[in-house]
Amino acid sequence: MKIATYNVNDVRKRIDPLRAWLDVTAPEVVCLQELKCTEAEFPYDAINAMGYEALVHGQKSWNGVAILGKGVAPLEIRRHLPGDTADRQARYLEAAVLGLVVGCLYMPNGNPQPGPKFDYKLDWFERFNQHASSLLASGHPVVLAGDYNVVPTDADIYATRSFKDNALLQPAPRKAYRDLLESGWIDALHRQSPSKSLYTFWSYMRNRWPRDAGMRIDHLLLSPTVARRMRTAGIDREVRGLEGASDHAPAWVELSG
């Protein structure tokens, strides 16, 4: 079974590259981020024609997350992080699908920092970690997949000189991510490639895709019971080069059983 995550960066605009990717790879579960549309605007018919059922948590023009099941409808568990009932941004969706609990997340970017956007990122990260701890304690098989908007280490970015003030590389979010790993979550991509740099995002600016000037900000974290089933993990880099594609590439993990 393959579980994938993809920041599609406007699902209605990227239907063609999304279809091209799914036609070739056909993962059983897909987490999408940055839909940039409401549930009513989501292209359900096009997704159904690709063989997937969609559970959607949308927001007009911004954010938005979805979980797709190949030939099966994901069963919703929750669509907001606990801990702040006033936060209505569409950044988290959790569902049961094919024997797994799947959390799809779109972490706040946090730029510019310091400032209120960075404060919101840290608050959201704290609430996410608290919820992740409760999921670990449940003993359920869980995958937390999405755009975490954090570069875990300097090895996960092509260069750091121009990013010293970027929210994605600041000590606090990096520590929050490290806390997840230290609590028991397994970073599938790092486990697959502990010494080779892997990138999932290349900005449209400054010719960064042709120069391979990327960074790894899309992650799949596995609970211990799921990690024992991991066969392999990777990034479908070629999707970033398709005409009209997102500035992210899909990442995935393949499990036994």
Image: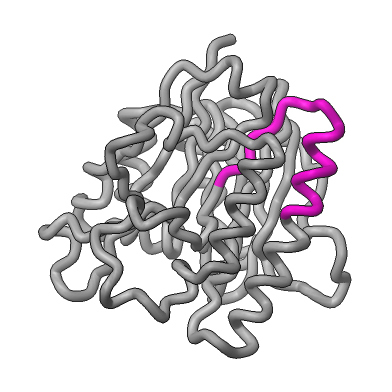
* 38, 183: nearer the viewer: 183
Q: Is residue 130 above or below residue 51?
A: below
Q: How many numbered badges does the structure rendering display?
A: 0
| Residue 52 horizontal/vertical position (percent) | 54, 34
Q: Quadrant of residue 19?
A: top left
Residue 182 visible in the shown view: yes
Q: Which residues are magenta?
A: 129-145
Q: Is residue 184 above or below residue 198?
A: above
The residue at the far bottom in this view is 115
Locate the C terminus and report the quarter of the image it occupies: top right
What color scheme is it?
one colour
Residue 111 shown left or right of residue 53 in the figure: left
141 falls in the magenta region = yes
* 143, 68: nearer the viewer: 143
Please report the residue visible at 49 percent of the width from the left and 33 percent of the height from the top. Answer: 188
Residue 7 visible in the shown view: no
238 falls in the magenta region = no
